[in-house]
Image (cartoon, rainbow, N blue to C red):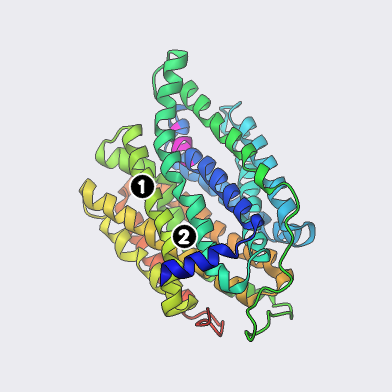
Amino acid sequence: MVAVRARATRGKISPPVWRILLHSSVFGLALSVADLLFNFYLVSLGYTAATAGLFSTIGRAAGMLLGIPLGLLIDRAGAQRAILIGLAVYSAGWVLMLQFTSLWVMMPIQFVIGGAYILASSAVTPLLAGVTSDEQRATIFGWNASASLMVGLVGSAVGGLLPSLAAGAIHVGPQDTAAYRIALTVVVGLSVIAMLPVIGRMPALTADRPVGAAPAPTIPLPMWMLARYALAGLMLGLAGGAFLPFQNLFFRNTFGMSDAAVGAVLAWTALSMGVGGLLGAPVAARLGLRRAAALLRLGCAPAMALMLVPSLVPAAIGFFLRGLFMAASFPLNDALVMRATPPRQRGMATSMMSVLWAGGWAAAAWISGIAQERWGFTPVLIFATACYVVSALAIITLPIGDEDRQ
């Protein structure tokens, strides 16, 4: 039944959707390489985990501070143009980042990169919502998440090998700064390539609801309501910021793994996230968007707790399952919010979700980097587990009706 429904949905998909999925895949590849290697690059410069946390905080703080203006830019300039602007600035930022080693120069560049990332990533949701019908969104949003996340399987695996390949080419050690700098130039190239599928006309659907369904909302929502829709994102940001900026350091320091081995673990997890993106729509078809999103988000909590076991195998399994449940839940939550938001406010709604997510990430990453130097990863993992529970509660109590209609 799921396969029949998937084929039926796939047959109705317009060319702009496939172009957006291709963009998400290429940009996701760039992000996975950057996530894996940038912390190692900072360590090669002589910085510590606290510095890595600071940089993650700066990037997310940019999204928090600029999110509302960027949301207005998306709604006024158009989501498609906003993606192109974001990718252009993101690529230029990485070019500059790799030219300097001073924190006082690198930190403002990281702020620019963070703002550009938030702009490009936030604009994808309203753009995709504009070229899909309401009945398609749970599936297509899941495909988009899968496209951007599963490609991390390639990005993490290849990214783990890039420093060694670069080191061999310039005859330095595999953990030398020059090797990491060359490897990170791949991020620039992939970000430029990610612009290409988004260039060109993408006509929006004139009607995005099935016949007989409730009409799309047209009355503008107050800002406090948009903030309430984004509360689950705040908790997701706190959970992610506490651990994900340090995921590579966790596996390297806790289990003594090499860069390539860490890349393999992250690649394995990227596969789980890609599968998770495909899992959400079938679950939503049975439970409804709200209940499916909340239940899948709740699954992140025991998965994260499993990483407290001081052994590589259960820790890797827990990391795998966390990625699976998280990737399955957030496209459903996005689709739920897009259903309840007037089309002219979708950019602002997405940016509000990004603002609270980025604010949570920024605060958690900074505090986590300091906490790790004193107490290690145990309190960080416990905190992230609790945040996933609260995030699930925020979804199940959303003041959005009609959640069971597909």
> Can you say whether 238 is above or below 260 in the image?
below
Q: Residues within 10 Å of mark 1 (few under 14, many from 20)?
A: some
> Can you say whether 44 is above or below 319 in the image?
above
Q: Main secondary structure of the magenta part?
A: helix
Q: Nearer the viewer, residue 52 or 319?
A: 319
Residue position marked by numbered label 2 in the rendering: 238
Secondary structure beneath label 2:
helix
| Label 2 vs 1, first from the N-terminus | 2
Looking at the image, residue 232 sits to the left or right of residue 222; the answer is left
Residue 179: image x %, image y %?
A: 46, 23
Q: Is residue 24 magenta?
A: no
Specify the amino acid type for callout 2: Leu
Secondary structure beneath label 1:
helix
Q: Is residue 38 magenta?
A: yes
Q: Residues within 10 Å of mark 2 (few under 14, many from 20)?
A: many
Q: Residue at x 54, y 62 (%)?
A: 10
Looking at the image, residue 212 sits to the left or right of residue 330; the answer is right
Q: Nearer the viewer, residue 193 or 228?
A: 193
> Can you say whether 180 is above or below 269 in the image?
above
Residue 50: image x %, image y %?
A: 44, 42
* Picture quadrant where residue 26 is located: top right
Image quadrant containing the N terminus: bottom left
Q: What residue span does the magenta drawing correspond to?
A: 35-40
Q: Which of label 2 and label 1 is nearer to you?
A: 2
Q: Residue at x 63, y 31 (%)?
A: 95
Gap in angstroms between the C-alphas marked 2 and 1: 16 Å
| Res. 372 mark | 1
Specify the amino acid type for callout 1: Gln
